[in-house]
Amino acid sequence: MAVSKNSPQFAICIQSDDPDLLTPRMIYEILPDENAARSNYVRVIDNEGEDYLYPAGFFLLMDFPNEVKRTLKRIPSRAVSTSRLPRA
């Protein structure tokens, strides 16, 4: 999972081993971390608002339009849930 340094990156959690820290179907901000990526991990701002390493397989990296990325950056990380987004 490659993460760009230039633009905010987001991913949807698809698996969690601790629902207090990661909630499936929620959108999380992914921070660039080349060392983590080499070990198949990603640095994520979790439900506690802390950045932590999690297995890359727990997430699907999403390529949102820039307007959506800007909006997600303004929402507190604990509040970004796909269950709150309008259905397509």
Image (tube, rainbow, N blue to C red):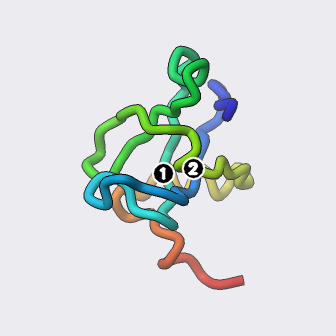
Local packing at callout 2 (Cα closer than 10 Å; few below 14, some 14-19, many 20+) is many
| Location of residue 33 with respect to 28 vertically, above or below | above
Corner quadrant of residue 88: bottom right
Q: Is label 2 or label 1 in front?
A: 2
Q: As drawn, is 15 to the left or to the right of 11?
A: left
From the viewer's side, name the closer residue of 18 and 31. 18
Identify the disc placed on residue 59: 2
Identify the disc placed on residue 63: none
Q: Quick one: which residue is furthest to the bottom in this view? A: 87
Local packing at callout 1 (Cα closer than 10 Å; few below 14, some 14-19, many 20+) is many
Secondary structure under tag 1 reads strand
Which amino acid type is marked by label 1? Tyr
Residue 12 percent across, percent down from the top left: 56, 57
> Which residue is pictured at 49% across the width and 38% down the height?
55
Q: Quick one: which residue is furthest to the top in this view? A: 35
| Location of residue 19 with respect to 45 vertically, above or below | below
Secondary structure under tag 2 reads strand
Residue 15 percent across, percent down from the top left: 49, 57
From the viewer's side, name the closer residue of 14 and 7. 14
- Total of numbered circles in the picture? 2
Which amino acid type is marked by label 2? Phe
Identify the disc placed on residue 28: 1
> Which residue is pictured at 68% across the width and 52% down the height?
62
Whether tag 2 and tag 1 are in contact, CB under 8 A, the answer is yes
Residue 47 percent across, percent down from the top left: 31, 53
From the viewer's side, name the closer residue of 13 and 3. 13
The CA span between labels 2 and 1 is 9 Å
| Location of residue 75 with respect to 58 vertically, above or below | below
Marks 2 and 1, the one that precedes in the sequence: 1
